[in-house]
Image (spheres, rainbow, N blue to C red):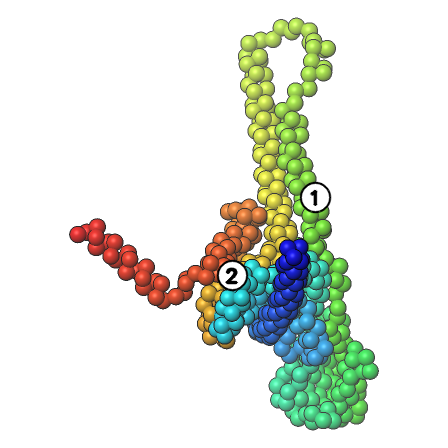
Amino acid sequence: MFGFRIYCIRSKIQFMFCQFNCRFSHFVKKRSISLKKLNKLITFQFFQTFLPTFFVVLFILLMQFIWVYIDDMAGKGLTLITIAQLMFYFSASIIPLALPLSILLASIMTFGNLGETYELIAAKAAGISIWRIFRPMFYLMILLSIFGFFVSNILIPKATLKYKALLYDIKQQKPALLIKEGVFYNGIEGISMRVGKKDPVTNELEDIVIYDNRSLGGKAVIITAESGKMHMSADERYLFFTLYNGSRYEEMDKQKGYERTQPHSMLNFSEEEIVFDMFAFNLNRTDESLFKDGYQILNVIQLQHKIDSLAELVNIRKTTPIHYYNLYLKINDSLYGKYIPKPMIVEENELMNDVLINKQMIISNALNNARTVKSVLDYTSTDVADTQKLSVRYNIEWHKKYTLSVACFIMFFIGAPLGSIIRKGGFGMPVVISVLLYIVFHVVSITGEKMAKTGTSTPQSGMWLAIMFLAPVGIFLTYQAANDSGLFDKSAWVKLANRIIHTFKKKTA
């Protein structure tokens, strides 16, 4: 009987244990499903804000670029394909400006929306820590940081090379051929023309006057015609003017003595064709290899090679003046003592004159040698300073490749906890806060870069100044969010102020 009871108790315990395992596995499975849904929700809301913000910022920066270079592009007759290529190449170079701002704004809005709809509070109440909520975004930031490094190291050098070469060609191109009625056109070199009337459809012209000053002897040629027609060649290399019922006036050669009897010649024609070379009006592409040595065109490996080469060059140039110094101060004593002159009897006055002459020659030679050494030292110091400035530029660009990736992490660890603390979504408060923080980041970045360029600080400290400035802010906000701090709670600040006032009153009493 006792053994049967023990058997029943053991069976009951096994049944309860199996039931607990089933419930626990169901709870774990349900919790894992809810975490997956939460991860998908956070990731979806982040991209829903990140992508529009990223492209809007790119568009704004592109409009700024067009506004700056509108004078160089206007009136050049550029095709839409050329303009689109220029904007596409430039858009790649401004990704480092748009990416951190987009991450910051998207992080604040994503976690601000979760806090505003109490989904973040519900997740914390279910036992999910803030670190677990941030985990999918942390992995996403790793991918975005890798993308940022790829953009800085691979995409930007190639895009910058192409857009700088294309922009240079656009600046060198002459304005498009635009002949207006009743106005002299001077776009073609050595030619000035006026058209009384022009048909924009058929390109038929009336009352034509052309001044041709292309002659090497300075002779002026004036062509007038009642009517005419202009058209371009098939390859748009040449412009053809077909003139009807006109005259050609030309000054005679003054060197042959014709200016008295025949000051000029006149030729009437019923039809004449004039050809103008339009090579300068076409967009002629420059060889991109001319721009490939710029520090913005190189990747990390190429920049490091340049930095090492310049450091070696600086060391060589620093030791160069020593050879000049030793050359001018060296005493050639190899022949000293071999040829001893025989004693000579010299009068005292003659001896004094020789001594004075030799003394003046020695002083003169010493001064010349000193001036030569000084000029060598001045040139070398200037050359070394210029080389070091160039090395600083390469160092700045090298560090800039990595700061973008780290900035993505910093902006996330500022935006995500800040959004969870303020619990405000939408385009109101998050936009204001993110723009202000980004302005601070951008101003500190520019300040650090200028300090590095002027030599006030090293390239390392100058380029990482903004990261070092905002990293403590991100750590502080993340700590506050993890501990559910009321950092932006009005009542908490009122209580703190009352405590300070109460303490101050006690001390004064």
User: Is the residue under label 1 in contact with that under label 2 (CB below 8 Å)?
Assistant: no
- Single out the residue that lies furthest toward the right: 234
Q: Rate crowding at label 2 as few (under 14), some (14 to 19) or many (20 or more) other CA atoms within 10 Å.
A: many
Task: In the rendered view, tell whether residue 293 sits above or below residue 316.
Answer: below
Tell me the distance, in whole angstroms, between the alpha carbons under discs 2 and 1. 39 Å
Nearer to me, 218 or 38: 38
Q: Amino acid at mark 2?
A: Ile
Nearer-N-terminus badge (2/1):
1
- The mark found on residue 371 in the picture is none
Task: In the rendered view, tell whether residue 105 sits above or below residue 326.
Answer: below
- Image quadrant in which you'd find residue 56: bottom right
Nearer to me, 217 or 327: 327
Q: Amino acid at mark 1?
A: Ser
Say which residue label 2 marks. Answer: 414
Residue occupying image coordinates x 73% and y 73%: 283
Q: Residue 489: x, y in percent?
A: 39, 66
Task: In the rendered view, tell whether residue 411 sits above or below residue 455.
Answer: below
Horizontally, is 146 left or right of 441 in the view?
right
Q: Residue 181: x, y in percent?
A: 63, 89
Horizontally, is 497 left or right of 470 in the view?
left
Horizontally, is 509 left or right of 8 in the view?
left
- Image quadrant in which you'd find residue 408: bottom right
- How many marks the image carries: the answer is 2
For mark 1, give the secondary structure. Answer: helix
Q: Rate crowding at label 1 as few (under 14), some (14 to 19) or many (20 or more) other CA atoms within 10 Å.
A: few
Q: Residue 301: x, y in percent?
A: 72, 50
> Would you say residue 77 is visible in this rendering?
yes
Say which residue label 1 marks. Answer: 309
Nearer to me, 70 or 86: 86
